[in-house]
Image (cartoon, helix red, strand yellow):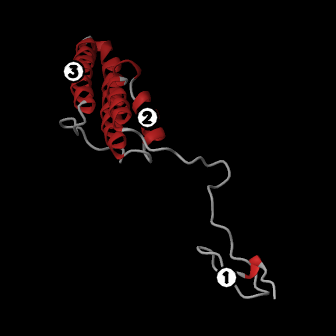
Amino acid sequence: MTENPQDQPVEGRQTQQPGQPPPPPAPGPVYGQQVQAPVSPSDARMWAMFAHLGGILFYFVPSLVIYLIYKDRDPFVRSHALQALNFQIIATIAYAVSWVLTLVFIGVLTGLATFICVVVFSIIAGIAANKGQEYTYPYIPQMVT
């Protein structure tokens, strides 16, 4: 009597009764969805720093883009990008108010004060992010969570 190798149970594979359909395959990524690699700690610190420093020249756009790209990949980058985004939204509102106030000249002073605050606090936050520390801007409400 010769044994058929297909009749022997293979270790790690479940045997099933004859006539039953095979089990469904394990689900993979959805079409168009990419499996994202985790972010290394040095890259996380770099992107968190860019989220803060990018707002000096480009308002809230860099922190928003970094938040949208890295929000599901690294909690450290997500936290810093959210802090930077909230700060830059408030700064953008302050710039808009300063622009309106230029009609009575005080807008030049408030715009300059806003720019100085943005530069100083963004650099402080960027340094903290590059060191791997958490940072929260003082007196800034959480508009985006």
| Closer-to-camera residue (116/98) | 116
**Residue 48, picture quadrant:** top left
Separation of marks 2 and 3 at Cα, in angstroms: 21 Å
| Closer-to-camera residue (76/59) | 76
At label 2, the amino acid type is Ile
Observer-side mark, 1 or 2, equals 1
Image side of residue 117 versus residue 75, left or right: left
Query: Tag 1 or tag 3, which sits nearer the N-term?
Result: 1
Image side of residue 90 versus residue 35, left or right: left
Q: At 66% across and 48% down in the image, what residue appears?
A: 32
**Residue 63, picture quadrant:** top left
Residue with the mark numbered 1: 15
**Residue 128: horizontal and vertical position, in percent?**
22, 31
Separation of marks 1 and 2 at Cα, in angstroms: 49 Å
| Closer-to-camera residue (2/142) | 2
Q: Say whether marks 1 and 2 touch (CB < 8 Å).
A: no
Locate the N terminus and report the quarter of the image it occupies: bottom right
Query: Which class describes the residues within 10 Å of circle 2: few (<14), some (14-19), or many (20+)?
Result: many
Q: Say whether marks 3 and 1 touch (CB < 8 Å).
A: no
**Residue 38: horizontal and vertical position, in percent?**
44, 44
**Residue 33: horizontal and vertical position, in percent?**
61, 49
Residue with the mark numbered 3: 120
Q: On screen, 42 above or below 11? A: above
- Secondary element under disc 1, as helix, strand or loop, is loop
